[in-house]
Image (spheres, rainbow, N blue to C red):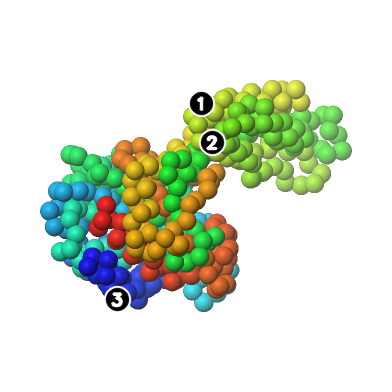
Amino acid sequence: MLKNAIRQSTAESLGEIQAHRRHIHRHPEPSFSERETGAYVARALSSMGIVHSEGWCADRGAAGIVARIEGQEPGLKNVALRADMDALPIQEVDRPHASAVPGWMHACGHDAHTACLLGAAQVLQSTKHLWNGTVQLVFQPGEEILPGGASLMVAEGALALNAPNTGPGQSHGPAVDGIIGQHVYPQLDAGTVGFRSGAYMAAADEIQIRIVGQGGHAALPHRAADPIVASAHILTALQTVVSRTCDPTQPAVLTFGKIQGGVARNVIPDQVILDGTLRTYDENTAQRLRAAIVRVAESTALALGVRAEVDLAIGYPPVVNEPELTERCRQRAKDLLGENMVVDLPLRMTGEDFSFYQKVVPGCFYRLGTGGDGPGCRNGLHTSSFDIDENALLTGTEMMAWLAATE
């Protein structure tokens, strides 16, 4: 009876869910600047008659929201659902439904996450006479950049049961029993979902190395201390850090994706800046690699007559799905969608700040297939042509409502 009610309610709400996604997609906002998105979510929740509090992460300029829906016997169980709301600094390709904000787009599916959670809110509200417990809805800003909106939401009390009544920074009392998060995945067909128990996504540190030399004329290199040549040696030397420091059985990735240095072909600059990321699963491994990065960068720079200043920002912890919760969610997904529509996920070296919630309560972070035949619907996340098959919004909404109602 509950399954049929959730499916019927989702089908009836699909037009609104699509409208939510398209509106948010057209109006992306940077991390910790999601004020209009937050206001839109708040208006939608108010129209549904759902209790909620605003102003979460307001000190960072954001507008996070925490809401609550009570079913029968509200104290029997308490589960949270989470969606993130921020966009990325990417110029979207030209298409009819593209972002209206130059240089920004929802290239990681956060518009779909928010739309699905709004849809799940509507479905849970309309079926609350059929399920037991309380569902907390967490609309989070700032997933894409440190310190991660999840860490701030946790610190402000978003997982406390009375959070929707007391607001940020005032919540006290017991936390929810667990939290469930959903993320789009273009490599899976729309209509499918994927799960993995235990370690799933990596910890993500940020690295900046400033190589300071002495500039000069390109024709007179003997009168300069060339940071460009030194940066090349440092980058090459750092490629041995993982292979010669890390236990081969421990996954780790060190990548530098940005180099800044120089203004002209005939001028040796004063400095070069390297920006990169370190991905690990094990804290002991991470500590050894961080120390090795500093040692290799500084010693290589010294040997070449320049100076390396290393700034290591410790980022998100690894996403580790609580096994019992994840297996229950996996089985309930099969009950809803059918066994052949639920797949096992491999390890990923990408990071996610959902891990901060998992530090406090058991959590399950799963993937929603969004792949399809439309333009961009198989393209990777964080690319200018990324898009979703909107049929996935039906599955994503059903899944969130079903998992929360049956957990």
Assess whether mark 2 and mark 3 are in contact (beta carbons under 8 angstroms).
Answer: no
CA separation in Å, label 3 and label 1:
50 Å
Quarter of the image where the N terminus is located: bottom left
Q: Nearer the viewer, residue 396 or 50?
A: 396
Amino acid of disc 1? Asn
> Considering only order in the chain, which callout, 2 or 3, is on the residue closer to the N terminus?
3
Q: Residue at x 72, y 43 (%)?
A: 262
How many numbered marks appear?
3
Q: Which residue is mark 1?
A: 284
Q: Residue at x 69, y 22 (%)?
A: 299
Relative to residue 123, is residue 223 depicted above or below? above
The residue sitting at the front extreme is 339
Q: Which residue is mark 2?
A: 280
Assess whether mark 1 and mark 3 are in contact (beta carbons under 8 angstroms).
Answer: no
Q: Residue at x 33, y 50 (%)?
A: 328
Assess whether mark 2 and mark 1 are in contact (beta carbons under 8 angstroms).
Answer: no
Task: Please provide percent x and percent y for residue 67.
Answer: 24, 55
Task: Please provide percent x and percent y for residue 185.
Answer: 49, 58
In the picture, residue 381 is in which quadrant? bottom right
Q: Nearer the viewer, residue 178 or 306?
A: 178
Disc 3: CA contacts within 10 A as few (<14), some (14-19) or many (>=20): few
CA separation in Å, label 3 and label 2:
43 Å
Work out whether residue 69 can be spotted: yes
Mark number for residue 143?
none
Q: Which residue is mark 3?
A: 12
